[in-house]
Image (tube, rainbow, N blue to C red):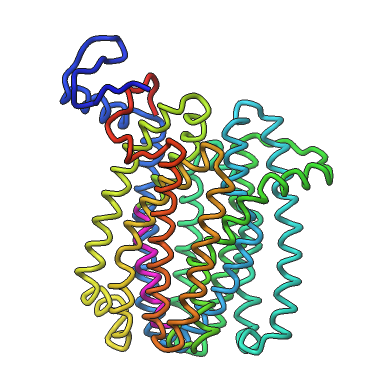
Amino acid sequence: MSGQRLDRPARTLSGTPTGGAAARAQVLSALVRSPFARNAGSLYLIQFANYLLPLISVPYLVRVLEPAGYGAAAFAQGFINYLMLFVEYGFDWSATRKISVQRDDPKAVSATALQVWGAKGLLSLAGFGVLLVATAVVPKLAEVSWLLFAFYGLVIGNVLFPTWLFQGMESMVAISVINLGMRAAVLVGMFALVRRPEDVVIYAVLTGGGGVAAGAVGAAVAWRMFGLKPMRISWAGVWGALKEGWVLFLSKGSVSLYTVGNAFILGLLTGPVAVGYYSAAERIVKGSLSLVSPLAQAVYPRFNKLAAESKELALFWGQRMLLVMGGIGLVLSLVILVGANIIVSVLLGLQYGPSIGVMQIMALVPLLVSISNVLGVQLMLSFGLDKAFTAILFGAGFLNVITAIFLAPGLGAVGMAVAVLISEAFVTVAMLAYLHRQGLGPVSSWGLQPWPRKEL
């Protein structure tokens, strides 16, 4: 690895010396011209439209369903989110990584796609069995059983929608287009049919039905777009797909302990009203991350290829992505921290006053998630550090649950927010420390990476 700094005279791809300003201009020019930048740009345009829909739906739902009804829906959806993660099984990472390498071999791509679909189909059957048992033996789940069965459409849609295939083939724009269309249709149905707290079941049916429809359309588009061919899949192939994604499945499950399942955890420890206050604030905070996710999605397949070709190349772009995503996350966090009072008043209404404190506590989450995405997903997974990645996430999930058990019963929604913030901070610090020990720390080697020989 070269010790040459980018702010000193460097050499361009042609070998001509250039100053620091010229080198930085070349970095910017390479980023703008790169395929991933065009992909990310398209995703951002669509994501902006996707971001507008919750700004319309959330203010309507929280007022119509009221805190108790909105909290009941969030509690049910929190449990369904666990089942969705069970069905995803880490394929969004493992299958994406595999297909990004196979993309020039149509036969291999078809085989992998069918194996993953088969594996997810089996997992969905197992998930439905878990749902039947859970609603029979857990009283709080039995109270919202109709909501749970309606929301299970989201799990079926997850089985059908090949997000991992679109990502691996670097054609992510189709994902956002399809989801945008279905979410818009659900929004229209919601305004037409959901008028009072008792209509929460209708909202669940619309949401679950939209998930199934989006999944079916996504599968059909992917089949035609990538020229997939029907072929026999064996049990060995399905088992192989499950085996490849096992470690990453554990990672996904660990993530769920401090992300998608918080409403469910809080509901078990308190009641639907506290869940309503927390979920409304979390929806806004997590929704802001939609401004980061297109960039993260677009760059992940490319980082896998970079890491396979050159450690120095991957670290060079890792530093730059840390600056970009960290900068976006910092802006989002500041906006949420300073504007929490206004945001809650405008989007949620006066009856959601307790959500203000929750938002302010969680304000740092966008910054922490933006940084940890680069450290964990783009670097650790790309360099094959799956086990360490999983261990860190499991530790964060365990920490979140334990902290919530101590804080939530007394502090309610605020206690859950504190638990989430502590967990996200743990993930970021632990990943940074581990990468530093492995000689892959993008911060410890700041400015030491050479000018890359290949565009991102």
Viewport quadrant of the N terminus: top left
Residue at image location 18% in from the left, 22% down from the top: 8
Q: Is residue 17 left or right of residue 265?
A: left
* Quadrant location of the C terminus in the rendered image: top left
The image quarter in which residue 236 lies:
top right
Residue 284 part of the magenta segment: yes
Residue 5 rendering spot, x and y as whole percentages: 24, 25
Please say whether residue 331 is one of the residues in the magenta stretch. no
320 left or right, relative to 95: left
Find the residue positioned furthest to the top: 15
Main SS of residues in magenta:
helix
Does 100 sit above or below residue 274?
above
In this rendering, is residue 76 above or below 393? Answer: below
**Count of marks overlaid on the render:** 0
157 vs 14: above or below: below
The magenta span reads 276-291
Coordinates of residue 168 in the picture (x, y in percent):
56, 38
Q: Residue at x 66, y 62 (%)?
A: 156
> Residue at 48% across / 65% down in the picture?
185
Compared to 433, does 382 lie above or below? above
Residue 232 spot, x, y in % from top left: 83, 40
Residue at image coords 63%, 64%: 155
- Give how far across and how far down residue 392 sits, in percent: 51, 55
From this viewpoint, which residue is outermost toward the front? Answer: 437
Q: Nearer the viewer, residue 233 or 262?
A: 262
Nearer to me, 329 or 144 = 329
Viewer-nearest residue: 58 or 355: 355
